Amino acid sequence: MSATGQTRALTPPDIAARKGKTPLVCLTAYTTPVARLVDPHCDVVLVGDSVGMVLHGLPTTLGVTLEMMILHGQAVRRGLERALMVLDMPFGTYEESPEQAFRNAARVMAETGSAAVKLEGGEAVAETIRFLSARGIPVMAHVGLTPQSVNAFGGYRVQGRGGDGERIRRDALAVAEAGAFAVVLEKVPEPLARRITEEVSIPTIGIGASPACDGQILVVDDMLGLFGDFRPKFVKRYAELGQAADAAIATYAREVKERRFPAAEHVFGDDPKTVRGGEAA
Ligand code: KIV
C-alpha cells in the first residue's frame, strides 16, 4: 500500500474520473531513481520527449527516437508503483497514419509496460486518437504549444491569444470527442484554459495554462532547478538542486587537489580484519 493508502496503480479511467475534482498532480521522469521519488506524490508520471533536451542535450525534441523513449520508459516503469505511467510518442512515429501510430504505440506499451501514450496535436490527430482508443490504447492528448511543431510555430510562444483561441478550443474539443482520457494544455492564456476546461468532458492538465485546469504538469528537472538557467515564467523552482550540486562538486574538486579526500575513513588497510571508519575491507 502506498503512503496515500492507495493499493493499486492508477489507470486511465481513474484519471478521467478526476475531472473537476482534486487537481491531478503530474510530473515527468526519465530514470528509475527519479520515478521512485515522484511516484508517491503523483497521479501521472510522464516519460516526456523533453528527455531529449533535458538529459541528452538536444536543441529540440525533434531528434528523440522511439528507441530512446523505450529505454527511458523501461527505466521509469521499474520505479513506479502507484502513479499512471504515460509515454510520449516522439516526432515522426504517429503522424503518418493511424496504422503507423498503432504499430509504434503498441510496441512502446509492450516493451515498457506503459499504460498509455501521449500524442501532440488536436484536430489533425483526432482520427488517430479514435483509432488507438478503439483498439485498447489509452491516449493523453496535448494541444496549445506543441513543442514538436516548434518550427511551424517559429518558437516556443504562447498559443491561442485573441482570435487564435478558437483554433485551440476546437483542438481540445476534437481530441476529447475522439476518446482521449485527458489533454495537456501547454502555454495558453488563462481565460482560454478556463473556457476549455469548462467545455471538455476530460481533465485538462496545464503547463503554463493557469490553475483553471484540472491538474498541473511540470518537467521535474525544471522545478528542481536541475536544467541549467532555463527559467520560463510558468515554472516555479521548488528547489535549487543544480546550485547544490555545483557547490558539492566544487568542494570535491578542492579536497582532491588539497589531498583532503579520500580521508582515513575512505581508505582500505592492508589487513582485511582492520576496520577503519566503520567498514571492513
Ligand atoms: O515532453 C514533456 O515533458 C511534455 C510536457 C507536457 C511536460 O510533453
Image (cartoon, rainbow, N blue to C red):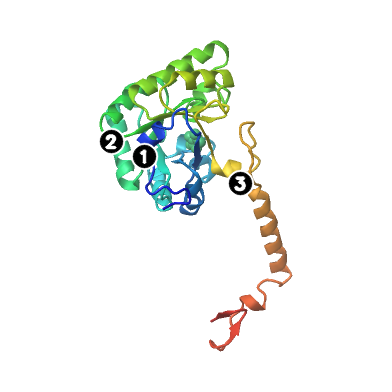
Which label is found at residue 132?
none
Regarding residue 57, the answer to whether it shows in the image is no
Which residue type carries mark 3?
A: Leu
Q: Which residue is mark 2?
A: 103
Crowding near pointer 3: few (<14 within 10 Å), some, many (20+)?
some
Q: Of callouts 1 and 2, which one flags the residue occurring earlier in the amino acid sequence?
A: 1
Instruction: Give the image location of residue 250, x and y in percent.
Output: 70, 58
**Which residue corresponds to mark 1?**
11
Percent from the top left, x then y, of residue 230? Answer: 63, 38
Left or right relative to 249: residue 127: left
Toward the viewer: 248 or 33?
Answer: 33
Q: Which mark is residue 226?
A: 3
User: Does residue 95 lie above or below 246 as drawn?
Assistant: above
Q: CA distance from mark 1 to mark 2?
A: 22 Å
Q: Nearer the viewer, mark 3 or mark 1?
A: 1
Q: Earlier in the sequence, mark 3 or mark 2?
A: 2
Q: Is residue 50 left or right of residue 90?
A: right
- At a point 57% along the width and 18% down the height, the residue shown is 191
Q: Is mark 1 within 8 Å of ligand 1?
A: no
Residue 227 place in picture, x, y as percent: 60, 43
Say if 163 sits above or below 156 in the image: above
- Give the percent coordinates (x, y) of residue 53: 53, 40
Q: Residue at x 54, y 40 (%)?
A: 219
Could you classify mark 2 by the number of other residues whose Cα lies within 10 Å: few (under 14), some (14-19), or many (20 or more)? few
Going by the numbered disc 2, the residue's amino acid type is: Arg
